[in-house]
Structure formats: structure tokens, C-alpha cells
Image: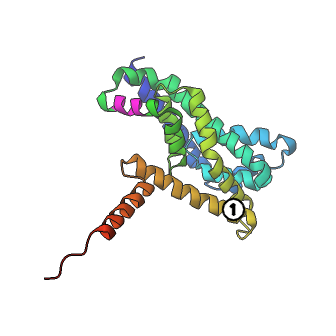
Amino acid sequence: MSHRLRLAALALGVGALAAVVFLTVSRSPEQVRDLVDGTGAWAPLLFIPLSAALSCAFFPGQLLAGASGLLFGTAAGTPISIVAGTLAATIAFSISRHGGRSALDELSGPRIRVWQDRIERGGFLAVLYARIAPISPFVWINYASGLTRLPLRTFVAATAIGISPRAFAYTALGGHLDDLGSPEAIAAFAVLVVMGLGGGLLAWNGAGRPSPRAVWRALWRRRSARDREPDAPNA
């Protein structure tokens, strides 16, 4: 099979999977919960691969974590959400790595190589920042990272750490939809705010702008310099 056909087959396969899930599965954490509810001790073992498969088909991870909270509560649901999200990322990464990376290496032009090199040089931190950044396209990052030479273990470690805070937040919110004033729901909102601010700062610095601390120091030095200037003589 030619390189172009391999890439086309990969894109069509992922697209078809996403279309099937979009048309057959409601965007509702309650429906995901209902798929495994009532299975007793088997529920976590069924939920994790189900959640991972739905995530690979572009089902929103926030809703999957919310379903975990509905099923298992915050304490048990958070590690389950983290494992499911990490497994989903690993599967998508592996599909892309084995299905299209060698083909992309053969067909890629300078712009794609620059993008690949940037991710590979950043390594762990590049993936971690992408996970922390607000409104980050979780599934796209999984597939795109597989098209680079980034080691799988580096990708998995950065993903597991990076998704943990939001996994807790969405799991807690899913388990407390009927009581958003509960301590766990308030903590979840606080985590999302902190993650949003932290991701915004990372995006600011990543765009080549000075950090807020550097801006503050520059303003302070400028003010101190003005204070030291002698007053102009009276005319």
C-alpha cells in the first residue's frame, strides 16, 4: 500500500469510527453510565475500555469523566477517569504511530518536519503543556503525537500527570450535578479556574511573550528609574 493510501485509510478509519459514535451514542454522561450500570464489581473493568474506545472516537472526555463520577463517586471515579483517559491516549497514539508515522515521514514537507521536531525536542514538557492548556484538543493531540518520534513512555507519563487535575474536576462535577454547592464541586470549580489560568500563562510564554513576572520587574525598574530622576529646573 502506498504512503498516501495508508494515511488516507488511517484518516478514513478514524473518521468512520467518530461518525458511528456521533450518530449512535448520545452526548450524555448518563447514557455512558447506563451502559455499565448494574454490572457490580465488573463496572470499573468495563467502564475503562468503553471510555477509552469512545474517547478515541472523539467522544468528549469531560462527559466520560462525568459518567465516572456518576458511577463511582469522586474518590473511586477520579483514578478510574485517569486510567481511562491515559489508556485512550495510548491507543490513539499507537494507532497513529503504527498506521501513519512512517508514511508521513516519507511524504512530509519542511513545515511538517518543523512541527514534528518541535514536539520531539519539547518531549515530556511539550505534551504536559498541551494537556494543561485550556480548551486543549485532547484526542487530536493523541493522534498527532503518534505521528512524531516521541517515545511512547514519555507521552504516557506526561499525559497521566497532565490530565489528572481535570479528571478530578470533571469526575467530581459529574458525581455532584445535583449539589454544585458541595465541597467537592467547589473544589472542582477551583481546579478548573487554576488550570485555566495556568494554561493561559503557558500559552502566553509559549507565544514568545515575556512572563508576567518579567513584565512586573520591568515596570518596577521603570518606576524606580523615574523616581531617581532629578526634578527639572524651574523656568
Seen in the picture, residue 19 relative to 94 is either above or below; the reply is below
Question: What residue appears at the point 18 percent right and 78 percent down from the top-left corner?
Answer: 233
Relative to the observer, which residue lies in front, 92 or 12? Answer: 92
| On-image quarter of the N terminus | top left
Disc 1 packing (10 Å; few <14; some 14–19; many ≥20): some
What secondary structure prevails in the magenta region?
helix
Please, which residue is most extreme toward the left here?
235
Who's the residue at 72% across and 40% down the image?
Answer: 48
Q: Nearer the viewer, residue 189 or 230?
A: 230
Residue located at (74% from left, 42% from top): 47
Residue receiving disc 1: 187
* Left or right of residue 20, residue 228 in this image: left
Left or right of residue 108: residue 175: right
Which residues make up the magenta segment?
Answer: 112-118
Q: In this view, does 188 lie above or below 181?
A: above
From the top left corner, tell me how far across and down residue 160 is, in percent.
Answer: 64, 39
Which percent across, then down, holds residue 68?
73, 50
Helix, strand or loop at mark 1: helix
| Residue at image coords 50%, 24% | 99
Residue 27 at least partly seen: yes
Examine the image and state in which quarter residue 49 appears.
top right
* Quadrant in the picture for residue 226: bottom left
Q: Is residue 108 or residue 120 the one in the foreground? A: 120
Residue farthest to the top, as pictured: 1
How many labels, in total? 1
Which amino acid type corresponds to the residue marked 1 in the rendered image? Answer: Ala
Residue 53: tell me if it is visible: no
Please determine whether, in this image, residue 163 is positioned above or below residue 106: below
- Give the left or right position of residue 143, taking residue 81 as reference: left
Magenta segment includes 165: no
Q: In which quarter of the image is the C terminus?
A: bottom left
